[in-house]
Amino acid sequence: MKYKVALLQSEEGFSVWVPGLPGCCSQGATEEEALANIADAIREYLDVVMEQLDDAEVREKEISCQAYEL
């Protein structure tokens, strides 16, 4: 799966978060480290979501929406 991530550079390094996954964020001293860390954070985030959906009926629904350029 592909997720858009937002990076913000500061004096301490890079902050990174996933706008499509509320609360999914990480950081790193370098851009590469931050991106590796957010990949791990996404996997962990999705593991928790899947655990919470154990007893739920899951469906796919396609919707149309306006695309935004970032």
Image (cartoon, rainbow, N blue to C red):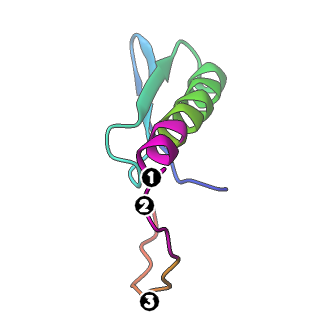
Q: Quadrant of residue 31?
A: top right
Mark 3: few/some/many CA within 10 Å (<14, 14-19, 20+): few
2 and 3 marks in contact (CB < 8 Å): no
**Badge 3 amino acid:** Ser
Q: Mark 2: which secondary structure? A: loop
Q: Mark 3: which secondary structure? A: loop
Tell whether 70 sits left or right of 44: left
1 and 2 marks in contact (CB < 8 Å): yes
Foreground residue among 42 and 33: 42
Q: Which mark is residue 56?
A: 2
For the question of whether residue 4 can be seen, the reply is yes
Query: Residue beneath label 1, please?
Result: 53
Residue lying furthest bottom in this view? Answer: 64
Mark toward the start of the polypeptide (2 vs 3): 2
Query: Residue beneath label 3, please?
Result: 64
User: Height in image: 26 above or below 59?
Assistant: above
User: Height in image: 29 above or below 23?
Assistant: above
Residue numbers of the magenta segment: 47-59
Task: Check if residue 58 falls in the magenta segment.
Answer: yes
For the question of whether residue 8 can be seen, the reply is no
Residue lying furthest front in this view? Answer: 55
**Badge 2 amino acid:** Ala
